Image (cartoon, coloured by chain):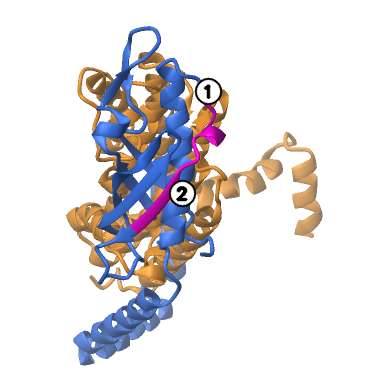
Amino acid sequence: MSAPLTSGAAQAPATGVLARAPRAVPTRGGFPAALRAEATKLTAQLRAKLLLAACLVVPPVVVAGLAGQRPPSDTIYGRWVHESGYADSLLLLGFAAQWVLPLVASLVAGDTFAGEEAHGTWKTLLTRSVSRSHVFWAKCVLSAVVSLLALLLMAVSATVAGMLLVGTQPLVGLSGQTVGSTAALELVAASWALAAAPLLAMTAIALLLSARVRNPAVGVVGPVVIGLLMTLLGAVGGTHLLRRALPTTAFESWHGLFAAPAFTGPVWQGLLTCAVWTVVCLLLARVHLVRRDITGG
Amino acid sequence: MTMITKTASRSTAAGGPGTGWVKRADKATRRRRWQGLRPSAGAAVTGVIVLAGAAVLSVSGGQDVTQVKVQDSLQTSFANLWALQQTETGHPMRPTQVHPAATCDKGGPDVPDVGPGGDWICQMTWTGQTEPGKFELNVHANSCYTASGPGSKVGSFTVTDTDGREVTNPVYAFDVCMDADASA
């Protein structure tokens, strides 16, 4: 009996009291409700706003600062920062990959579960008509959105700052070849886009730490330390496949795009590695969160 | 406010201090007991597995950095950059006219010529340079390297271009990335 009523309500949503009931259900519970609640909390968070603002403001300041100095020659593309604005963008990408992007990944994600712990708000949160799983995925999705948004802002800000303050001259590639202005812009965009995969992997690591350690400070600083250690491990010679199994290695997969002939092996390896890290960390975090005893604590 | 109260009371009525609660607490206690038995043992096993996996990975796979790859990439890159520098300073040249020939060695005769390190030395000749110039390479684990050319043969940090501007000398020092997956 209820089936025709529901379908009728769906077809004609404005037919009175009966019609309102089925439409009201999804707004009260489940994943969308959890997502909305988490989004509200996130938009009220000062640190999330500061993060996004910094991603927008800092790159132009750095590019402007580089203009008056002897080029930094110890990082790839450092030598070319006065010759092409694209080099500035790539220098910032290379620099950000060391610890800035892990910090971007952990600033919100590292706090998201541990923060509930610190404020003692788990019980309040779980008395709402949403499951732990809904809360978990809502927090994961929003952490990923913040990370990707920060990366996008940083990429656009760095690239536009380079193009406006230094110029759109052709770029020297990593095989010494000259890359035309348009091709360089496309490759720069692709390079920043490739950083999304390791960034999401670092976000997943931060989420796992946040869920397990239950301390916001550890959740935020931990991934930065882990990122630095992984970068260090990847920089040690003779680690062969171990190097490729680290998510931080994927932050450098763009190098191949600027070689002639270009090679994309590291790109695919990086995507695969990061996907595995992301899935494993999220599953571990979910298992831990769903099974842990919150009510008794 | 009313919505919150309603939802809270409903969830209490449905799954509050009934059987579900007891079951969950039971499960938690059992788990705590299991964890309490050997908290360090679990962590130790995980640690050993991770370390063993890392050790296996770190000895698997071929060499990313080889002598042939270093020589080939140095020749290609130098030809491109030398042609660029010559063209910038008013002597138009194509990369195919440079004809570089490099011989690279890592850490002297007693060290195998594979792997990253700051002790790669390449002797290279090219069009107009019959006496080999010494290039010092710092090869990183990511298969990229920084090559520093001999100042007497390639010029200093900047060169003066045809418009009289001081521009970065492309061959004074340059970054090259090799394909770690390529054979040879």
Decide: few, some or many residues near mark 2? Use Cα within 10 Å; few <14, some 14-19, many ≥20: many
Q: Quick one: which chain is blue?
A: B
Q: Amino acid at mark 2?
A: Ser
**Badge 2: chain ID:** B
Position of residue A109 relative to residue A158, above or below, is below
Residue at 51% x, 25% y is B93
Q: Disc 1 and disc 2: Cα gap in Å?
A: 24 Å
Question: Which residue is more in the foreground, B77 or A147?
Answer: B77
- Tell me if B147 is positioned left or right of A201 in this view: left
**Badge 1: chain ID:** A
Q: Is residue A254 visible?
A: no
Residue at 48% x, 52% y is B72
Q: Is residue B145 visible?
A: yes
- Per the rendering, the colour in which chain A appears is orange
Q: Which residue is mark 2?
A: B73
Q: Is residue B96 magenta?
A: yes
Residue B166: x and y in percent read 30, 15
Position of residue A48 relative to residue A214, above or below, is above
Q: Is residue A19 magenta?
A: no
Decide: few, some or many residues near mark 1? Use Cα within 10 Å; few <14, some 14-19, many ≥20: some
Residue B181: x and y in percent read 51, 61
Residue B20: x and y in percent read 42, 78
Q: Are marks 1 and 2 in contact (CB under 8 Å)?
A: no
Q: Amino acid at mark 1?
A: Ser
Residue A54: x and y in percent read 28, 30
Residue A285: which quarter of the image? bottom left
- Tell me if B154 is positioned left or right of B74 in this view: left
Q: Which residue is mark 1?
A: A181
Residue at 27% x, 27% y is A58
Question: Which residue is more in the foreground, A101 or A145?
Answer: A101
